[in-house]
Amino acid sequence: MENPFQYADDFGPEKIIHVYEPKIGLKGILVVDNVSAGPSIGGTRMVPDISVKECFRLARAMTFKNAMAGLSHGGGKSMIMGDPEMPVKEKERLIRAFAQTIRDVKDYVPGPDMGTNEACMAWVYDETGRVIGLPKELGGIPLDELGVTAYGLTVAIDVAKDFCDLSLKGSRVVIQGFGSVGKHAARFLSKKGAHVIAVSDLSGALQNPDGIDIDGLIKFKEEGRKIGDFPGGHRLERDDIIDIDCDIWIPAARPDIINTSNVNRLKTRILAQGANIPATDEAEEILYRKGILVLPDFIANAGGVICGAIELAGGSEASVFPTIKERISKNMKDILGESQSKGLRPREIAMNLARQRVRQAMTYRRSF
Ligand code: NAD
């Protein structure tokens, strides 16, 4: 049998919970990693394949992300196995059943993630009484509708451009994933004068070297049509997007999509990690040696959780964008500056800072 403590280290995880309900086909995992800074926050993801390893890695990323964002929250994550495009009634039943089983795990606050949205969070709230990312009507700040994570990512890119002598105006952007993070990143960057020259989603990819009409494409997708069928560009195979020469490449889909088997195909100056853990450590090392600036996920995509923490504390929507801007730009400036002066990867600098913060938080906990 698998060793249940194989992921245990100085920081956690505090709990790993498997959820199984054969009657309705529910399979889920919850990892509460570290709660020294406060109750853990982390998304509830619905994907066809789930694993403890991935859930743990994502929960750990949340521990460090929340610490670096200066939040009084630890890190957690949960996963429900299923096709996110399943009929809505079936999805509601699965999500409600999952929420019921984790109702008493009070040191975990779920949030929207891949395959879940504000409506899903309303169901979870109805079952558990705690959640971030609620619809407006329930007092939530609709983080996916506002595109707060993509906004934070744009802030991070805006800082990073000065470290590689790039102007956003006229820069060429490629985005993998056209959901809450990807489509809003395309929108914010286009507004800053960047040309989004290629995008992909599960259904395929689209390229236009002159820049895609992003508002048009968002509308087209909302009509239920496929990215590759959009008239303002030409269709590509989904995974060909990695070969496109650009200035900024944004992963906004699944983990580990950049790895040693494909990293040398990337031709970009900045890899801005909208997705969580989108590149393996080996791949990031190769990118660093090639002089490609990697903006670490847990710093650059913290906009969503900052917004969620503000919502949970009863804060206002008006404070969300300035808070994200202030925290992410300060973190990015500090990390990229130190990376340059010390000759270390941005992730190493960021990890050292995050570890220090979590260790400090751990000293305030009862240890007897
Ligand atoms: P989403 O479900 O809204 O969108 C995901 C998109 O990725 C979809 O367009 C889907 O079709 C596409 N996709 C999936 N597999 C793909 C593949 N192999 N190739 C190309 N496209 C693919 O999810 P989201 O909320 O946008 O999250 C995307 C990533 O960003 C995840 O890693 C998530 O953990 C991370 N993230 C999201 C937030 C947030 O606020 N939503 C915050 C921080 C991090």
Image: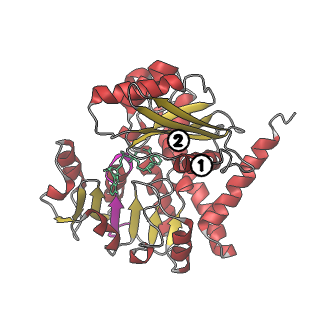
The amino acid marked with disc number 1 is Lys
Which region is colored magenta? Answer: 168-181
Which quadrant holds residue 345?
bottom right
Is label 1 within 8 A of ligand 1 (CB to nearest ligand atom)? no
SS at circle 2: helix
Residue 366 x %, y %: 83, 33
Mark 2 residue CB less than 8 A from any atom of ligand 1:
yes
Residue placed most toward the observer, 180 or 253: 253
Relative placement, left or right, of 88 versus 107 is left
Query: What coloring was used for the rendering?
Result: secondary structure
> Of callouts 1 and 2, which one flags the residue occurring earlier in the amino acid sequence?
1
Q: Which residue is mark 2?
A: 305
Q: Is residue 236 above or below residue 188?
A: below
Instruction: Give the x, y percent position of residue 239.
Output: 31, 65
Q: Which mark is residue 105?
A: none
User: What's the residue at 34%, 30% (across, down)?
Assistant: 91
**Circle 2 Cα neighbour tier, 10 Å, few/some/many (<14 / 14–19 / ≥20):** many
- Looking at the image, can residue 227 be seen? yes
Crowd tier of the residue under label 1, counting other residues whose Cα lies within 10 Å: few below 14, some 14–19, many 20 or above: many
Q: Are the two marked residues, 1 and 2, in contact with CB atoms closer than 8 angstroms?
A: yes
Q: Is residue 4 above or below residue 136?
A: below
Q: Secondary structure at mark 1?
A: helix
* Residue bearing mark 1: 65
Up the image or down, 161 lies above or below 181; here it is: below
Was residue 151 drawn as part of the magenta stretch in this picture? Answer: no
Magenta highlight on residue 178:
yes
Q: Quadrant of residue 266?
A: bottom left
Q: Is residue 85 left or right of residue 106?
A: left
Q: Residue at x 72, y 47 (%)?
A: 11
Q: Nearer the viewer, residue 322 or 278?
A: 278
The C terminus, quarter of image? top right
Residue 316 horizontal/vertical position (percent): 50, 30
